[in-house]
Image (spheres, grey):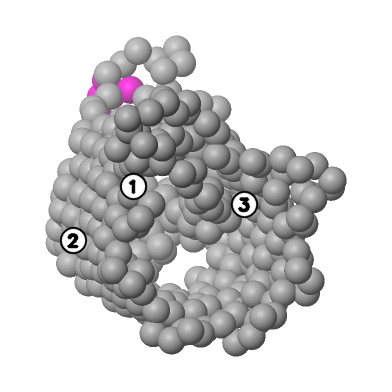
Amino acid sequence: MKKLYLGVIAMYLGILASHAQTKPQPVKDTTNYEARKLKVDEVNFVSAYYSQDGNNSAVTGGIGTEKLTDFANTLDLQMSRYSRSGKKHTFNFELGVDHYTSASSDKIDPNSISSASRQDMRIYPSLNWTVSNDKTGNAFGLTGSYSREFDYQSFGGGINLTRLSHNKNTQFDFKAQVFLDTWKVILPVELRPAGYGSGSGHDDDRPVDYKPRNSFSTSFSLSQVLTQRLQMAFIVEPSYQHGLLATKYQRDYFTDGSVRVENLPDSRYKLPIGLRFNYFLDDHFIIRTFYRYYMDNWGIRANTAEVEIPVKLTSFVSVSPFYRYNTQVGTRYFAPYGRHDPSATYYTSDYDLSSLHSNFVGANLRLSPPNGVFGSQHLTSLELRAGHYMRSTGLTSNIVTLALKFK
């Protein structure tokens, strides 16, 4: 049930973890070639604490506590070397570790302290290798990833491609990723067939089912420098999922008084389309705007608008207030507690998939003094970001993120 909330954290980890390029070294003549050693370009450490509360838990059919906390940490190591031909080879290793607690998950089996995902740890390493040309800016890369949690494991792979125009004013980026997941099918205690296990792995060796869920995603991005002050980007990110897409320990209650486990189609197409504009007002102000339209074949339609205004207070201190508004038309399969039609084929009471609107507001503080943060020349920047989220369903959350960059 934490799929949305950890997604929010992941988004902000990506925003805060800067990946600045170091200046390329001059390429020596190949007749006098000297092997270049692999060197560390930068190290990024990002730590985030997220907490939420609400009263629409999908585990108990759309009612009950949604209290959840997550402590997420990622360590990013970027290294590079130049080949004989002068190409830059960049290796980016990332290790993420999340620890969370979820009050609603304990309702899977209220009589047991071993309910799935009541508290758990997620570990997710990844490695990217990219070859780039400093003269043209063109690049090609490969990524491999792994993720493991109490009730699933995932193997991922991907490619990335960058192409720049001759004048460097136009940039095209392409990414493709695949995630092959295996889920442990955990059921609410009262809906388990005879002989079916709890999936806890503690003093319970009864069998449980395992089901696949495979995800395929692409991203097409076209960035353009329109004027000296204005830049824009157009982004399309189609994706497809197939396999077990329902969360089987989430209950659904029907008008006839019956209860079943959540059931959703085994395939899903998603199409987000985004447009970003950055306007450099002067040396102290930047206006960053973003709009995204989302649609899928489950009937969800959503619009998201965001604005962020970085304000440069000094040459090495900046503050960036931000605001995001989202409105969503929910899936045709959603109904609140006790409102599902007994004849329905698909059904969910997960409010993430309902009609809603939300507001997210906060600010980011960035320090990057020329002599290093706190006098340390290796600690080149520090960012602290805080945000408050409010949803029309009653869900509220807070997130605080700290990002450190070392060189």
Q: Which numbered disc, 3 or 1, marks the residue closer to the eye?
A: 1
Q: Position of residue 323 (x, y in %)?
A: 58, 77
Q: Magenta-highlighted stretch: main secondary structure?
A: loop
State the extent of the magenta-drawn residues as a range: 193-198
Residue at the front extreme of this rendering? 31
Name the mark on residue 50: 3
How many badges with numbers are in the image? 3
Q: Amino acid at mark 3?
A: Tyr
* Residue under pointer 2: 269
* Residue under pointer 1: 132
Alpha carbon of mark 3 to alpha carbon of mark 1: how far? Answer: 36 Å
Say which of 189 and 78 sits in front.
78
Of the numbered discs 2 and 3, the one sitting upstream in the chain is 3
Say which element carries label 3: strand
Say which element carries label 1: strand
Q: Amino acid at mark 1?
A: Ser
Q: Amino acid at mark 2?
A: Tyr
Q: Position of residue 328 (x, y in %)?
A: 37, 76
* Side of 269 where 291 appears, left or right: right
